[in-house]
Amino acid sequence: MAVDYEIHDHDVLIIGAGGAGLRAAIQASNAGASVGVVTKSLLGKAHTVMAEGGMAASLGNVDPADNWKVHFADTMRSGKMINNWRMVELFAKDAPNQVYQLERWGALFDRTPEGKIMQRPFGAHTYRRLAHVGDRTGLELIRTLEDRSIHTGATVYMECIVTRLLKDGDHIAGAFGYFRDDGRFVLFRAKAIILASGGWGRMYKVTSNSWECTGDGVAMAYEAGAELRDTEMVQFHPTGMVWPPGVRGILVTEGVRGEGGLLKNSLGERFMEKYDPKKMELSSRDVVARSIYREVQEGRGSPHGGAFLDISYKPADFIRTKLPSMYEQFKVLADIDITKEPMQVAPTVHYAMGGVDVDGDTAATTVPGLYAAGEVASGLHGANRLGGNSLSDLVVFGTIAGQCAADHARGIASFPGIDDAQIRDEQEILLRPFESGGGENPYLIHQDLQDIMADHAGISRTGPGLEEGLAKLAALRERACRISIKGSRIFNPAWSMARDDLFMLTVAEAVIRAALARTESRGAHWRLDYPELDPEQGKVNYMVCKADGCMEVHAAPIPPMPPELQEVIEETS
Amino acid sequence: MPDETITFRVWRGDPSGGQEVEYRVPAVTGMVVLDAMHYIQAYLDGDLAVRWNCKAAKCGSCSAEINGFPKLMCKTRIDGLPADAPIHVHPMRSFPVIRDLVTDVSWNYRVNKEIAPFTPAEDDGEPWIMYQEDVQRLYEPRKCIECFLCQNTCHVLRNHDDFAGYYGPRYMVRYQYLAMHPKDILDRREALKQKAGIGYCNITKCCQEVCPEHIHITDNAIIPLKERVADEYYDPIRWAIRKLTGGERKPEESTTGPGIVETPK
Amino acid sequence: MTVEERVAEAPSVRQPPTNAMPGRGGWWIQPNSVAIAFTLFILYSGWSVLFLSGHTTYGPYLSPFYSPHIPLNWPLSAAILVAWVPLGFRATCYYYRKAYYRAYFRDPPACAIGEPQHPHLFAGSYSGERKFPWVLNNFHRYFLYLALIVLGFLWWDTINAFHYGGTWYVGLGSLLMLANVILLTGYTFSCHALRHLVGGSVDCFSCAFAGRPRHGMYGLVSKINPYHPNFAWLSLASVAAVDIYIRLASYGAFGHCLGTHFGC
Ligand SMILES: Cc1cc2nc3c(=O)[nH]c(=O)nc-3n(C[C@H](O)[C@H](O)[C@H](O)COP(=O)(O)OP(=O)(O)OC[C@H]3O[C@@H](n4cnc5c(N)ncnc54)[C@H](O)[C@@H]3O)c2cc1C
Ligand code: SF4
Ligand code: SF4
Ligand code: FES
Ligand code: FES
């Protein structure tokens, strides 16, 4: 018998209340579906809130020459052409509309003197393209969507953790989880489910990601039979804080470089001259991150093992208005006044380009009824995400997913059936740590996982290193089965950590296996044993899926780009 | 600082009561209170309930009362607190405890639902032109990270329990944005006076003192809104002029609140 | 469920407010110092205005409590004809409201500190500024208008204080009066009601009538508005100081010397 649980029915269930989830909720509600939104945290706290620099859209407000084609080409090139080109096309075309839509829902961006939306330059964007509000664009985005979505009729289940997707045959049927505040179990029955659960940065120690980014959605989709793609592509943001130890990894927005910040090594050289003399500090993230890494490796790092990032030559007032939260962050957390002295920065794990494979036009995964949008989905960013492309990704594909999921649900007459076995199985997994006397500490498992990922699947990778990491993962998984925790189910963080560990172990394996498969260096994926780009592997994506209970990786050829898009790439080169 | 340990007294308990529990945590340079809570979770007491997300003072999840003062745990450095005394960490007092440092703040979300959303006029759909001078003062209220420290501190809620009468400072900040936005067409004054209960505030500025985003809640949100309400209700000369000239009025925000959707539970 | 419902159901759910916050000390220093300072000022100014109508001028100087100078022949002090204006202005001032609610009414005495369970003045329970008498504070703007007039007189007095015996003249008293009137001007022009009046009420400066100049004025007032509490305290002190100085001078405390000008 399954332990008691409560049941909620929704046409469309959305897992995640970040930018993608909330945008999808608004769209699906407006399309007439009854919508439930589940989030691990409180509303408005999702990881999206941390985004700083801006959202990319070719509005052409400051550089009139900009248009969707240039944005398309920039995104494809920086993704090293393994992106899903259809997604990129839809994205580049729709992003400006989405920015204006947000403004009509009450978002407020910085303005140009002519009263239009201001745009700032960012790495590897040809033109000044990022609509922004100082350095807290994500807050603006999520607050706007939050204040809008609460009036749409969607029901938000806060501090509720979904741990398993349920199926009826092939089709998605619901999701199972529990409420954090009292630990009661809950079953959501749904005709369609949208995954909008964000990334998995927390499997690394040095990361800019928030508590929630434990890859739940990717792991659940994998378990439910969906294909994952490009999981080897983990973005290292070049500039994370390095000192003091407690803040290591916290992001220093690319906006600092966008507003003129210079990178220097301990000799005072602007070392980007060596690596990318044309774009310098505003080269793409993979290039800048590797350059800093090299400088440090070769002994020209700052005292705490990073590079210097200096904006103090600009007027103090300018810095305080353009980068207010950076100013505050360094002042309070690191005792550094960035208007007077340089910051120390080093690469930090930032974003997962890989994720659940989706169809560009519908955001549908390979599981019928299951959709994915936002960081959890894959395809738009290819091998390297451009700064600012994620926030517009959230709204563009949040909209598409919301609409298509609502349409899909409309075509289904009654709620799919759910057999009790799936629920019992999940309850068993969830309750095991309370009953087990194995003695493993979930927090320490997490720390060990972080060490494995840093050592074996970090910014630079080698075949043997990855193999070793894989072996360590297997051993760690053994230990994870023996996690035991004390206390009750009422708001017990050790309990959620225990399940998160399992999610992260699954995703970590997918990262390492795909990284082993890609025997070349491309974008964020840097193999020391295969330092060159391999044109043949530029024609494939590595897909991960569950086959007979085991993880399997295979190469899937990228469909050829239609001639009109080919032309776009050529004419902008 | 190495080899030093710091003593924490963390309130632990649930709705039926609780007490301070003492923990000793090794000191690390630049450490914040939230780091110490994480240390306790990992090595001393795994089930210590703490709410946090970003650890970068951006999400407003980790609100607590540290040495009797409402603060964000991830923004409170240990070296800024008295070194020789234990550090007391308590949950916010104005909201019901769920467990340990975690409180039930859902009341705030209910309030937010009662506020009519941003409402622009129907127009041709062209991109808006808004000059910096028109929106300059609107960036400040948008910095709010909804940490609810101001709600927790406001004596109207904390000491007088007037949850039914007053929306609290966080939502005065929200109203400031809506009321002053050049494109919002609703007249928010009656709503402010009636359902939001701005009159309960006696501008004693504690909200402003605790706001981690340094929003001048009282000076730039509440007082200007009080002045707007005074225009409508406490200004006989303006009233007379209005009566004499007639003049067009903006549509008013409903005082009973727009389509409230019940939160689950 | 609302918080109240929860509280009603399980009274122990919320920890009651208290002023014995663990680890927190010294919060009472500020409200008590403010209370003492206010009380001293009120006692002195009340005494000065009500009972000391003599010795309020000296040479070209005029005590600010007695401005504008009204030659009257009645038993009461002439100052009370005007003094209610600055009194009302300050009593309804947003800053002073904060200060006296905290210092006198302990509503609250300090942030996140419990309040004594005193019966609230004129109302059974706390009602903020919604009921008499505190609702009257909403009329602050009218005191502002009157205070602007009084401020004009004070400037006039100050100019006169630089003019004595048919010629220009500078003395300690005139300098004190100048400092005082500057501080009072700072106080008055950083007023929240003035800020609202000049531009705070405008939603769209680029569309409103006279929007640009109003935006300029609003910007200026907004610049000094954060210093309103500072002006409030400094001008309070300077008013008293000028009054005391002139009285002492008029009692002959500094001999009969009005400054270097007279060569003594
Ligand atoms: C510091 C920082 C700065 C950034 N700056 C920028 C920038 O300037 N521009 C840009 O374009 N991008 C930026 N990014 C990237 C961008 O913010 C993220 O990629 C994006 O916000 C992801 O949004 P999302 O909606 O996909 O998911 P998230 O915002 O991560 O939301 C995930 C949601 O899913 C919920 N969830 C997860 N798992 C579960 C579960 N098991 N059960 C229930 N709910 C669950 C969570 O509670 C949360 O609500 C930045 C990222 C960081 C870390
Ligand atoms: S100023 Fe008003 S809203 Fe702010 S804490 Fe005081 S009473 Fe509450
Ligand atoms: S106004 Fe300030 S204190 Fe209040 S919720 Fe917002 S950020 Fe927190
Ligand atoms: S954890 Fe986000 S504000 Fe402290
Ligand atoms: S005089 Fe203080 S606010 Fe008007």
Image (cartoon, coloured by chain):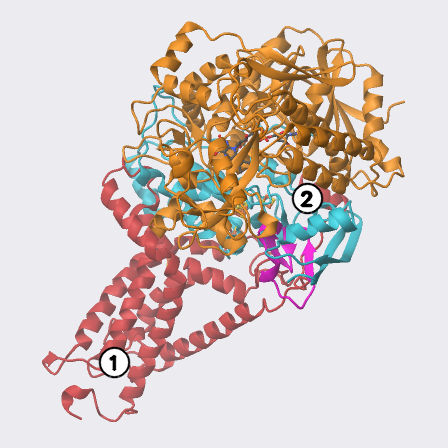
In the rendered image, the quadrant that contains the N terminus of chain B is: bottom right
Q: Is residue A500 placed above or below A93 in the rendered structure?
A: below
Q: Which of marks 2 and 1 is in front?
A: 1
The residue wearing badge 1 is C173
Q: Which of marks 2 and 1 is nearer the N terminus?
A: 2
Report the amino acid beneath label 2.
Glu
Distance between the alpha carbons at the discs numbered 2 and 1: 60 Å
Task: Give the image location of residue A150, x and y in percent.
Answer: 57, 29
Task: Give the image location of residue A432, x and y in percent.
Answer: 85, 32
Q: Which chain is orange?
A: A
Q: In this view, does B50 lie to the left or right of A440?
A: left
Q: Is residue A63 placed above or below C93 in the rendered structure?
A: above
The residue wearing badge 2 is C4
On whether disc 2 and disc 1 are found on a single subunit, the reply is yes
Q: Give the range drawn in magenta.
A: B64-92
Residue B20, quarter of the rendered image: bottom right
In the image shown, does B183 or C70 lie closer to the viewer?
B183
In the image shown, does C147 or A126 lie closer to the viewer?
A126
Query: Is residue B86 one of those drawn in magenta?
Result: yes
In the image shown, does C8 or A505 lie closer to the viewer?
A505
Q: Is residue B256 visible?
A: no
Chain under numbered label 1: C
Q: Is residue A166 left or right of residue C137?
A: right
Task: Give the image location of residue A236, x and y in percent.
Answer: 54, 34
Residue A564, quarter of the rendered image: top left
Report the amino acid beneath label 1.
Gly
Count of all numbered marks drawn on residues in the image? 2
Query: Is residue A524 one of those drawn in magenta?
Result: no
Q: The cyan chain is which one?
A: B
